[in-house]
Image: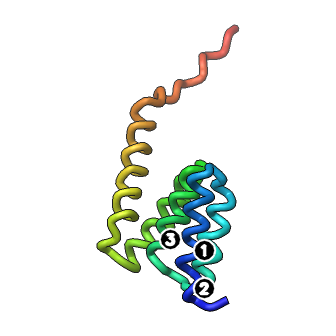
Amino acid sequence: MKPCWASTLDALGHACRRLKCYHEAEYWHERALALRPARAESLAGLALALALQGHVARAGDVLHAALAREPAHGVAAGLLERLKRSRSSRSRRSPSPRSPPPPRN
């Protein structure tokens, strides 16, 4: 398949994401990246699909790759900021780890 089809594969990925078929969305964005490696639009779409599946750390890594390729990519920057905020709000909400109770004699 020719690299010019990468945009079409990304569109399939976005359609799958909107239908909440996140694993399929991931597949199509990865296929687009196979045709045009390091394409910021494909990386941002892949990161969104990953984040929606709960793979937040991997999504963050992919977003950093997108921004390394295209620093002014607004979607990637916005999504990375949202991931950072959701991580920090989760860490504030989670209770602090407790020490185990002392042994009973």
The residues bearing labels 1 and 3 have C-alpha atoms spaced at a distance of 12 Å
Which is more foreground, mark 1 or mark 3?
1
Q: Residue at x 59, y 65 (%)?
A: 13
The three-letter amino acid code for the residue at tag 1 is Leu
Q: Quadrant of the C terminus?
A: top right
Q: Earlier in the sequence, mark 2 or mark 3?
A: 2
Asked if 88 appears above or below 4 in the picture, the reply is above
Asked if 52 appears above or below 65 in the picture, the reply is above
Specify whether 88 is left or right of 46. Answer: left
Q: Residue at x 53, y 77 (%)?
A: 7
User: Which residue corresponds to mark 3?
Assistant: 43
Q: Secondary structure at mark 3?
A: helix
Farthest residue to the left: give it: 72
Q: Secondary structure at mark 1?
A: helix
The three-letter amino acid code for the residue at tag 2 is Leu
Task: Classify 10 Å Cα crowding around label 2: few (below 14), some (14-19), many (20 and above).
Answer: some
Q: Quadrant of residue 37?
A: bottom right
Residue 18 or 94: which is nearer the viewer?
A: 18
Q: Secondary structure at mark 2?
A: helix
User: Which residue corresponds to mark 2?
Assistant: 35
Specify whether 101 is left or right of 70. Answer: right
- Residue 49 x, y percent position in the rendering: 57, 58
- Residue 24 x, y percent position in the rendering: 68, 61
Q: Quadrant of the N terminus?
A: bottom right
Q: Residue at x 62, y 82 (%)?
A: 34
User: Which residue corresponds to mark 1?
Assistant: 9
Q: Which mark is residue 39?
A: none
Q: Residue at x 54, y 25 (%)?
A: 99
